[in-house]
Amino acid sequence: MIIEMKNIRKSFGSNNVLKDVSFTLKGGEICGLLGENGAGKSTLMNILGGVHQLDEGMITVDGNQVQFSTPAQSQETGIAFIHQELNLINDLPIYENMFLGRELKTKRGRLDLERMIRETEEVFKQMNVNLHAKTMVRDLDASYKQIVEICRAMMMKASTIIMDEPTTSLTDHEIERVFTMMSTLKNNNVGIIFISHKLNEVMQVCEKFIVLRDGQLVEEGKVSEVTTEDLARFMVGYDVRTEPLMREKKLGNEVLRVEGLTDKHAFRNISFSIREGEILGVTGLLGDGRSDLFQAIFGAEKVSSGKIFLNGKEVKIKSTTQSINEGIAYLPRNRKENGIIKDMNIIENASIVTWPKFSKRGVIQTQTHVENFEKQCQALNIKMGKMTDSINSLSGGNQQKVVLAKWLSAGPKLLILDNPTQGIDVGAKEDIYDIIVKLAEENIAIIVLSSEGQEIIRVCDRVLVMYHGVIQGEVAGEAMNLHNIMSLATGGRRLI
């Protein structure tokens, strides 16, 4: 199947999101679709997927003009869309999600549950996925939800599959499994549009690329003829830095110390400390227990044993409210599910943590919140329209900055950032890195949890590497390199 999108234009009100964009995808091609958040990638694919309708231009499939008014029409043509925000229903089992909207029925008109379960299990077996069809979706972590989405698209026998950030929450092993799936699909003449901010993955799996910037197609070509640095430059319009971020380190007093912190399932015997102005990295492979550890320190989870000291004084943190009052802030891993409230506008999302702080006799002092957020907007360079616009109107990078503004408003002494650049483009990442360094220079102790070794090396002063719930080792200085980090993350030792 050959898909052509010709001279596509799309506006939302006065915002021109797509400006005369054209590209072609042939069966058996894997095309990387690149661009910063807000460049128009998702809108272009939503048009192809029938979610939005184009204003001008045309779409042809095998030379025949088509117009998709609904996602169902796009699917009937053989196009499957795996969205960045997963379209799964948590309160249904996997097999019902796999057949959602196209349920199988018996001759008597009843749901053919046995057949749906059997066909779901067959797909999982074919793809070497260790899941049970009857498992409730709410019991899956983000990585397996993503795999269910991919398997559902494959079950629909699509000729073209759009993958919007499919590897964001996956382990290295699961990513390789997805890439193997993609290779199989390619060999079966399925065309794939692969949207990702992970440029090394684009280099690994794609054969061609197109780059959007400010709604326009600015570059396209063969992946074999460019480097990751070239792709980053095409996306943002300038050379992107890759060297470690240097700063004058002036470490102050100890802010946090934990001794022998243990949870029966997620982590055990954890001991470390961090001082004012220090940036401490914590990394490992997915499932290493680092998120569970710092959620416990933040008061969101309980611990079995161990001690927590803040500013030299032992504390028993029993809730997140107490943690906030103690000067701890936690920016969660999953921005969409835990960082923002979609039904609230920008200013409401930015001020929710400080409602108790800026209120009198139970009445929220709105003007105080607005003044505080305006300062944060300037400091964090948040790009937005009105404060009262929906939080969903912002790009991923600016949403992340709003979440960060929310916590900074509370005046934290310790800031825990769990995968702070997940799902964010290279330009916005640089903004976040600069903000982290600036906050450290203001004597805030910062802990960065990240699966990206290069990110840890660029930003952090030293790094703790976790493996199966324990701290496998610590590296700093010249020893803080990818070889040592990966060796420790897989249960080995420092190589040098």
Image (cartoon, rainbow, N blue to C red):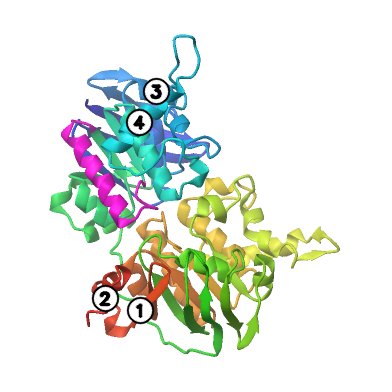
Q: Are marks 3 and 4 in contact (CB under 8 Å)?
A: no
- Which label lies toward us, 3 or 4? 3
Going from N to C along the chain, the mark reached first, 3 or 2, is: 3
Alpha-carbon span between mark 2 and mark 1: 9 Å
Helix or strand or loop: what does disc 1 sit on?
A: strand
Disc number lying in front (1 or 4): 1
Q: Which mark is residue 80?
A: 4
Label pair 2/1, CB-CB below 8 angstroms? yes
Q: In the rendering, at what x and y percent does residue 330 appear?
A: 56, 66
Residue at mark 2: 484
Q: What's under tag 4, amino acid-wise?
A: Ala
Q: Which residues are magenta?
A: 165-190
Q: Earlier in the sequence, mark 3 or mark 4?
A: 4
Q: Is residue 153 visible?
A: yes
**Vertical arrangement, residue 450 with respect to residue 414, above or below:** above
> Which is the main secondary structure of the residues drawn in magenta?
helix
Q: Residues within 10 Å of mark 4 (few under 14, many from 20)?
A: many
Residue type indicated by callout 2? Asn
Above-or-below relation of 17 to 281: above
> Circle 2: is it few (<14), some (14-19), or many (20+) Cα within 10 Å?
some
**SS at mark 4 in the image:** strand
Do we see residue 8 in this rendering? Answer: no
Which comes before the other along the chain, label 3 or label 1? 3
| Residue receiving disc 1 | 473
Q: Residue at x 34, y 40 (%)?
A: 163
